[in-house]
Image: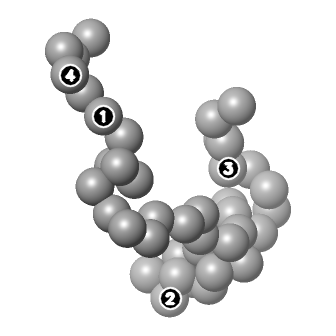
């Protein structure tokens, strides 16, 4: 474990979550395979 580690969001005034549909849209532009996985709900989200 890294001492004095902080979350990325602490360094930004506005650091909001990106909506799932926006992520899927970005993935579809970047990679057809990534888009298919995201749309199929096969992504492994942390709890």
Instruction: Residue 3 in the image: state x and y as whole percent.
Output: 19, 15
Please indicate whether residue 38 sits to the left or right of residue 17 in the image.
Answer: right
Res 16 quadrant in image: bottom right
Tag of residue 32: none
Q: Are marks 1 and 4 in contact (CB under 8 Å)?
A: yes
Q: Residue at x 80, y 56 (%)?
A: 41
Q: Which residue, given by chain and number where applicable, does mark 4 sit on?
A: 4
Q: Is residue 33 visible?
A: no
Up/down of 28 relative to 34, above or below: below
Q: Which residue, given by chain and number where applicable, does mark 3 sit on?
A: 43
Instruction: Residue 4 in the image: state x and y as whole percent.
Output: 20, 22
Tag of residue 6: 1
First reached walking from the N terminus: tag 1 or tag 2: 1
Frontmost residue, 40 versus 10: 10
Q: Residue at x 66, y 42 (%)?
A: 45
Up/down of 3 relative to 43, above or below: above
């Amino acid at each position: 474990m890294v001492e004095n580690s902080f979350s990325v969001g602490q360094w930004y005034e506005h650091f909001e979550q990106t909506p799932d549909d926006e992520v899927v849209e970005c993935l579809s532009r970047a990679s057809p395979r990534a888009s298919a996985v995201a749309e199929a709900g096969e992504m492994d989200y942390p709890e």
